[in-house]
Image (spheres, grey):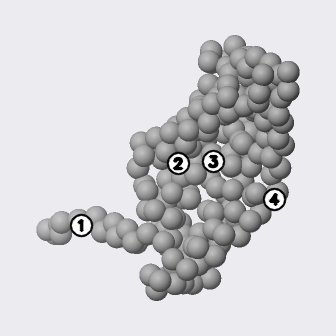
Amino acid sequence: MPSHQLDVPALPILLPLGGVLMVVSWLLLRRRGMVSARRLATVWLAGWYAVAVIGATLLPLHLAWGPGAGPAELYRIILVPLTTMRVDDFLLNIVMTLPLAAVLYLVAGVRERRRVVLVGLLGSLAIEITQAVINLAWHGNRWADVNDLISNSLGALLGFLLLRRVLRSASGRRLLRPWSLARPEPEPAPAHRPATRS
């Protein structure tokens, strides 16, 4: 019985996607009157970060379908955490989401730990569900792994803790402010000490 196969390459999709994001982000900044070299670098780096995540998690992709493709490879869907965890993959997934907090802060002004971790969790969940659907429907060659949800969320949390450490200092805030697209947060007022009588 016949089957159909398709190999989806990475670079012919990712490079044009990154280029389109660069042009669109420049147009949006220009329309808002916010074009500067640093802000442009911020949105371009954020765009290429998103492209790199797509490339690392979804591409390249081998697809097969039709009666001759055989049964779905259910072993590629891992629902039990930790038992089949590969340490190298776990660490790489943490590293992949470390920049997320900085990207969210600089592009959208997100400062709350809960929101950063939630974005990391939901983004990872969307990727894993996509991988599972592709595996079940088209015999994809990617793995849908609950361990990735854990490691991606942990990476987002660690990235937030690093960013918070930078933002605690006035010099850190001054360093990041020119790169930010969000409204600048007000500087904390110095603590007022009541005058003491002598």
Quarter of the rendering occupied by the C terminus: bottom left
Pointer 3 or 2: first along the chain: 3
The alpha-carbon separation of the residues under discs 1 and 3 comes to 37 Å
Query: What x and y, as percent, mark residue 166?
Result: 54, 58
Q: Are marks 4 and 3 in contact (CB under 8 Å)?
A: no
SS category of the residue bearing label 4 = helix
Pointer 1 or 4: first along the chain: 4
Q: Specify whether residue 7 is in view.
A: yes
Q: Specify whether residue 169 is in view.
A: no
SS category of the residue bearing label 3 = loop
SS category of the residue bearing label 2 = helix
Front residue of 163 and 77: 77
Q: Nearer the viewer, mark 2 or mark 4?
A: 4
Q: Nearer the viewer, mark 4 or mark 3?
A: 4
Front residue of 120 and 172: 120
Query: What x and y, as percent, mark residue 150?
Result: 59, 29
Query: Callout 2: 10 Å neighbours few (<14), some, many (20+)?
Result: many
The alpha-carbon separation of the residues under discs 1 and 2 comes to 30 Å
- 162 lies above or below 196: above
Front residue of 191 and 85: 85
Side of 59 relative to 50 (left or right)? right
Query: What x and y, as percent, mark residue 137?
Result: 67, 28
- Report the amino acid beneath label 2: Phe
Query: What x and y, as percent, mark residue 47?
Result: 63, 63
Quarter of the rendering occupied by the N terminus: top right
Q: Which mark is residue 160?
A: 2
In this view, which residue lies farthest toward the front?
1
x 62%, y 18%: residue: 79
Pointer 2 or 4: first along the chain: 4
Question: Where is mark 4, residue-wise?
Answer: 12
